[in-house]
Image (tube, rainbow, N blue to C red):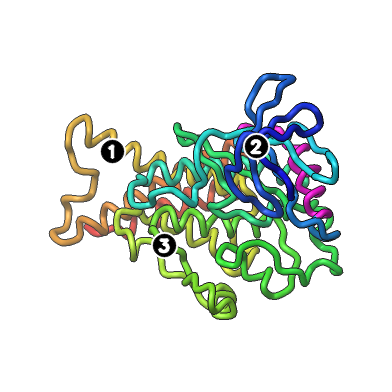
Amino acid sequence: MNVVPDRILANRYRIVERIGKGGMGDIFLAVDHVLEREVAVKILTDTSDEVSRRFLIEARSMARLNHPNIVAVYDVGVDREVSYIILEHVSGSAMANLDLGGISLDDAVGLTIQLLQALRYAHDRGVLHRDIKPGNIMLTDDLTLKVMDFGLARRLSDATNSSQSGEIVGTVAYLPPERFLGKPGDRTADLYSVGVVLYELLCGRLPFRDDSADLVAIMSAHINESPAPPRRFNPAIPVGLNDAVMRLLHADPAQRYPDAASAIDRLEAERLVWQTASARLDRGGTKAPLEHSVPGGQERARRAFAQALTFVVAGMVDSRRHDLAAARRNYAAAVTTLARRPH
């Protein structure tokens, strides 16, 4: 594809330089001479019918989505057989380039909440992403997250289309097991991929091995195995956060969070627990309640208190959402957890 610096597309967009590669095309930095701003330009590199179809799907899907955590689409067109999409230019880098060794628990959860907020917005408008992975997530210098590349997106109303259900798309290490079984994915499929991303942020590794030479083994692991709990690799992860990640990664879609909003509520509740505990320590340096009661059992007591507090906060969130049955279950779980704590 003859796209070189200083080429002008549509008498408006001057190509500056190639800055990356996305699904189905190369990405260039360009200048919009009409609005006098920098933009990103995705140029289709494969002109086959299937790729052209997905390229158009991406443009249409992203053009419907106007959210601060989703890369915006400004224009789409063809200039002398060059198909292009004009995108918001994000100053930063892909999450795939992030130094996982230097990220805090709070930043990991905060980024995941931003990712879920983008998906909640897209899902509410009937759009699945279907290829959530660090390479499709941009981060600005202030850790604002931007989801890009909706090239595999499809309408939720199409998710039960049996003629497409056998198609495995996306990046294997981040796909949910139902995709390998030829089943149509729904919004919980995107949530599974979010769980893989969060696991990687917290542990510095994927929940299942990523051996590109043995894709069958990766698929089999996603289908037949349960990942090791994140706390095995990072003991600093609170129990409640560990449980939230494992629920996102449940092999049965019905056992995952039903939607992005529910996952956001749980992660925000978990973050509130440890932020509150940290604030108490910063103010007075005192230990959390229950830690002093049993020699050798302080850690179990601390975990029980933290878990109970998580259930209480989750119950409060459920009450605000008028889900009284869920609120009662969470409050009952809090009481049970405290009753079983070490004395």
- Location of residue 38 (image quadrant): top right
Mark 3 residue type: Arg
Q: Residues within 10 Å of mark 3 (few under 14, many from 20)?
A: some
Closest to the observer, 162 or 71: 71
Mark 1 residue type: Ser
Which sits earlier in the primary sequence, circle 2 or circle 3? Answer: 2
Residue wearing tag 1: 278
| Type of secondary structure dominating the magenta stretch | helix
Residue 34 on image: x %, y %: 74, 20
Which sits earlier in the primary sequence, circle 2 or circle 1? Answer: 2
Closest to the observer, 258 or 314: 258
Give the number of the mark in front: 2 or 3: 2
Tell me what residue is drawn at x 69 percent, y 51 percent.
Answer: 25
Stretch of the chain drawn in magenta: 52-68
Mark 2 residue type: Pro
Quick one: SS at disc 3? Answer: loop
Question: How many angstroms separate mark 2 from mark 1 (CA)?
Answer: 51 Å
Horizontally, residue 252 falls left or right of residue 112, namely right
Tell me what residue is drawn at x 65 percent, y 32 percent.
Answer: 30
